[in-house]
């Protein structure tokens, strides 16, 4: 019943609204970005074709710094998320009393409105009254208040930590779900043979989660690369541009200064990197989960 | 009960005391990291403003009071409005997404047609592009549609980026519904549309509910970029943006801001507590192979 031409027509009919909607709101703007990037579009009424000028302009400015910073920021954040996520998943998989409660308690950062979590971090980073600076001083680890968002280096790490905080629950729960799919017989067989807990982790758990670990890292890389709210709320790319990643940079020139053409050129660069990441991601899934990528 | 469970636990799951200690210490660190901002935020909301800005730093509030939870309604007069806006925007987004996604997920789970995997892959790709990258053309699009500074400026793009996940989630659920019922209805001469409405929809209801909840949470959690860019009218602002304006002021009444934040995240917490089982199931349905 589901293979005839009329079935096909019915399927297209069912699919049409969602596909058209996404084409209109996502695909069309994507094409528009590319077109705009070759124009001098701004607030003024007329728009002229300028060829590669926008691209030449942004690369003449400090765009390569921004790219490098974005990659370092993204890499550090993803590495931390994955490390904490895997450790967390192993811990939450341990059969100890309170397990269910602990699994629930790690969810809030992921589920609450992102912006509100970021406001709380804004206070935590406050030098005079915030928790981190306060505790460091109480424990004698710091002589005076540290305004984490006030200096380039600390602001850079502060925004990473907040990004990790938001990403960790998802990675942890995903890795936990993966660990739970590992057949228990493997562990029991190894245990019968006298393998210790750490040995079982290294020789069974780790190899079995490698595919998920790689796909999740790639997915996390893509989301982290797109991360906007955290930096915008905490520092708006400051101090003196030290937390300006590509997406913040695009926002500042495109929306902040109304340079639509130049901003679009920056957005196109983001899309280029994203498409490379996406290709890698699809390669990974088709390699590890052939049925899913189909 | 607990005691018997512990003795029933297989040998392989028994831990030595130092292993238990290590596990609990690790879990404590993880939970502290995840919950510290909430603990601190709650503490701050209980501190009177005069004690808030005092050093040295004290972790526990000295004379805690819920005063800020009362005064915030005066300091942020539109607070109620912001919460209602947030719920309204998330609600309409969810409705729109479900309306578009239910037929699409059915088509993708039951029919074979040329371009099927391309469509699925394309939806997955949309998931990878964040709205923030497309803000410039979206801004122009919203302007030419005349949607700037309306609820729709937040609803229309918000929904588009939640569709892919919803499709994958619901499709995974629909794939598990046995085909026999449809085939029986088909053999009895029911039309395709009738089968969709009378056979599939009732059977898929639990999956639709899970998808709706996941979408609602996503829509409630992610209303910042579009709202801050496409809307400047206070009366339409969702909670995060309303509080952001408050956050940007010269003298921030942090205790009130934190109190307001807690009231704002309360709905999400309630949802976690009631639905945590489904949340994890929903998360893993599309992601992990069975």
Image: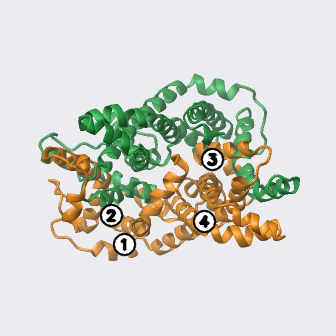
Chain colours: A green, B orange
Crowd class of label 3 (few under 14; some 14 to 19; many from 20; radius 10 Å): many
In space, the residues marked 3 and 2 are separated at their CA atoms by: 32 Å
Local SS, label 2: loop
**Chain name for mark 4:** B
Q: Are marks 3 and 4 in contact (CB under 8 Å)?
A: no
The residue depicted at 63 percent of the width and 47 percent of the height is B135
Q: Quadrant of residue B252?
A: bottom left
Confirm whether residue B149 shows in the render: no
In space, the residues marked 1 and 4 are separated at their CA atoms by: 37 Å
What residue is disc 2 on? B253
Q: Nearer the viewer, mark 3 or mark 4?
A: 4
Judged left or right of residue A229, residue A267 is right
Q: Nearer the viewer, mark 3 or mark 1?
A: 3
What residue is disc 3 on? B135
What residue is disc 4 on? B208
Judged left or right of residue B160, residue B273 is left
Confirm whether residue A114 shows in the render: yes
Q: Would you place residue B88 above or below residue B225 in this image?
A: below
Local SS, label 3: helix
Task: Specify whether disc 1 shares its chain with disc 4.
Answer: yes
Q: First in sequence: mark 3 or mark 2?
A: 3
What residue is disc 1 on? B72
Local SS, label 1: helix
């Amino acid at each position: 019943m589901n293979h005839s031409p009329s079935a096909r027509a019915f399927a297209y009919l069912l699919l049409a609204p969602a596909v058209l909607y996404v084409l209109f709101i996502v695909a069309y703007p994507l094409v528009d970005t590319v077109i705009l990037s070759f124009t001098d579009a701004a607030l003024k009424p007329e728009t002229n074709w300028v060829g590669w000028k926008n691209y030449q302009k942004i690369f003449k400015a400090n765009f390569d710094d921004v790219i490098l910073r974005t990659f370092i920021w993204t890499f550090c954040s993803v590495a931390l998320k994955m490390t904490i996520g895997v450790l967390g998943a192993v811990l939450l998989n341990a059969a100890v009393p309170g397990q269910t409660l602990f699994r629930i308690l790690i969810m809030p950062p992921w589920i609450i409105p992102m912006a509100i979590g970021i406001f709380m971090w804004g206070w935590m980073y406050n030098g005079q009254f915030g928790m981190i600076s306060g505790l460091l001083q109480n424990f004698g680890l710091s002589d005076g208040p540290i305004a984490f968002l006030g200096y380039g280096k600390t602001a850079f790490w502060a925004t990473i930590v907040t990004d990790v905080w938001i990403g960790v629950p998802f990675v942890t729960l995903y890795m936990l779900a993966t660990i739970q799919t590992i057949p228990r017989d493997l562990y029991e067989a190894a245990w019968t043979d006298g393998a210790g807990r750490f040995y079982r982790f290294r020789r069974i758990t780790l190899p079995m989660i490698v595919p998920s670990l790689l796909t999740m890292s790639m997915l996390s890389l893509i989301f982290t690369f797109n991360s906007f709210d955290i930096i915008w709320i905490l520092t708006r790319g400051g101090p003196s541009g030290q937390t300006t990643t590509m997406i913040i940079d695009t926002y500042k020139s495109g929306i902040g200064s109304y340079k639509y053409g130049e901003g679009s050129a920056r957005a196109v660069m983001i899309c280029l990197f994203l498409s490379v990441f996406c290709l890698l991601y699809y390669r990974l899934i088709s390699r590890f989960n052939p049925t899913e990528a189909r | 009960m607990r005691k018997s469970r512990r003795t029933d636990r297989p040998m392989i799951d028994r831990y030595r005391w130092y292993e238990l200690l290590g596990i609990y210490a690790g879990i404590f660190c993880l939970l502290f990291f995840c919950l510290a901002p909430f603990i601190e935020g709650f503490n701050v909301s209980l501190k009177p403003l005069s004690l808030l800005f005092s050093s040295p730093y004290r972790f526990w509030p000295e004379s805690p009071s819920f005063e800020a939870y009362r005064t915030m309604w005066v300091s942020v007069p539109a607070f109620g409005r912001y919460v209602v806006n947030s719920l309204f925007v998330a609600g309409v987004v969810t409705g729109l997404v479900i309306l578009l996604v239910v037929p699409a997920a059915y088509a993708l789970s039951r029919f074979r047609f040329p371009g099927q995997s391309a469509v699925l892959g394309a939806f997955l790709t949309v998931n990878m592009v964040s709205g923030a990258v497309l803000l410039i053309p979206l801004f122009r699009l919203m302007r030419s549609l005349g949607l700037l500074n309306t609820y729709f400026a937040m609803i229309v793009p918000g929904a588009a980026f939640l569709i892919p996940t919803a499709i994958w989630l619901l499709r995974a659920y629909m794939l598990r519904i046995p085909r026999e019922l449809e085939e029986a209805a088909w053999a009895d001469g029911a039309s395709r549309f009738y089968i969709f409405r009378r056979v599939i929809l009732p059977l898929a209801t639990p999956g639709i509910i899970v998808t709706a909840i996941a979408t609602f949470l996503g829509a409630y959690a992610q209303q910042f970029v579009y709202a801050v860019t496409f809307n400047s009218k206070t009366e339409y602002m969702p909670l995060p943006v309303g509080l952001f304006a408050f956050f940007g002021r010269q003298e921030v009444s942090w205790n009130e801001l934190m109190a307001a934040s807690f009231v704002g995240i309360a709905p999400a917490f309630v949802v976690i507590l009631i639905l945590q089982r489904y949340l994890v199931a929903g998360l893993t349905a599309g992601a992990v192979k069975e």
